[in-house]
Image (cartoon, rainbow, N blue to C red):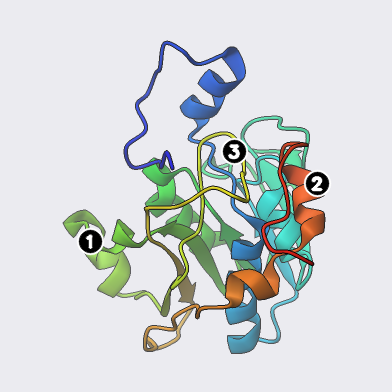
Amino acid sequence: AVVEAHAPGEVVEDDPVRRLHRKLNYFPTPPWGARAGAEIIKDLAPSVKRVLEPACGEGHMAHGLRDYFEVDASDIHPFGYGAVHDFLSDDPLPFARPDFVITNPPYSQAAEFVRRGLEVAHFGVAVLCRTSFIETPGRFRMFWGAKPLTVMAPFVERVSIQLSSWDPGLGAMTSYSWFIWFKGAQPLPIIPIPPGTKRRLHKQSDVARFASPDAGPLFEGK
């Protein structure tokens, strides 16, 4: 799979849409991966009701989150889903203050999304990123400083993420994790997202809504 860590800024063969998606760092989230993160947040904080997805793209993650929360969605680009809003700007949110911010942000701006999320949300922020997000020395204080990371939840099953679209049958070489900050909470042990989660949380209706017409079922009978 093409992943955001290695995708070049420009590729000559790109059509205009793919070129735009590359510029926006648009890598849609499989809805089942969004549900996996939502379950962890809901288990740890049942009082979380309303969330904001501020990098919603075409709605892949927001669609999965709606099984657990009331969801407001926005993006800096008019994808046709959610409000158009630059989350990292000083402009007021176009929604009421959320309990939680949950998103798969542009990787190059992920740290900024975490900091902004902690400012605007009542309870915390969760981002889906490559597991190696935790490694960079420049983000050390963000993970272990005054407002430390509460939960790291790595996917035991690989999450298939690629530029511009979701292909449910795509293989995956990159490890992803949920990184979750609860305001004022003490760090918890790693919470792995176990084998079987993909089958349990995948819905064939996700394929019908978001995948190309020739995409078959990820699992028989689902």
State the image coordinates of residue 168 (x, y, percent, origin top left).
63, 50
Which residue occupies 58% across, 78% down?
A: 196
Name the disc covering residue 86, or none: 3
Name the disc covering residue 204, or none: none
Q: Assess whether mark 1 and mark 3 are in contact (beta carbons under 8 angstroms).
A: no
Indicate the quadrant containing the C terminus: top left, top right, bottom left or bottom right: bottom right
What residue did someone put label 2 on? 209
Q: Is label 3 in a helix, a strand or a loop?
A: loop
How many labels were placed on the picture?
Answer: 3
* Nearest the eye: 3 or 196: 196
Give how far apart the Cα atoms at labels 2 and 1 are. Answer: 35 Å
Q: Is label 1 in a helix, a strand or a loop?
A: loop
State the image coordinates of residue 92 (x, y, percent, origin top left).
66, 46
State the image coordinates of residue 47 (x, y, percent, origin top left).
71, 85
Camera-side mark, 2 or 1: 2
* Nearest the eye: 71 or 17: 17
Using the rendered view, name the quadrant where residue 153 is placed: bottom left
Dot 3 or dot 1: first in sequence order is 3
Using the rendered view, name the quadrant where residue 147 is placed: bottom left
What residue did someone put label 1 on? 135
- Name the residue type under label 1: Glu
Which residue occupies 41% across, 42% down?
A: 3
Mark 2 closeness class: few <14, some 14–19, many ≥20 residues within 10 Å = few
Residue 111 vs 155, above or below: the answer is above
State the image coordinates of residue 13 (x, y, percent, origin top left).
46, 13
Mark 3 closeness class: few <14, some 14–19, many ≥20 residues within 10 Å = some
Which residue occupies 17% across, 58% down?
A: 137
Q: Is label 2 in a helix, a strand or a loop?
A: helix
Judge from the rendering whether residue 218 lies leftward or rightward of residue 15; answer left or right.
right
Indicate the quadrant containing the N terminus: top left, top right, bottom left or bottom right: top left
Judge from the rendering whether residue 63 lies leftward or rightward of residue 113; answer left or right.
right
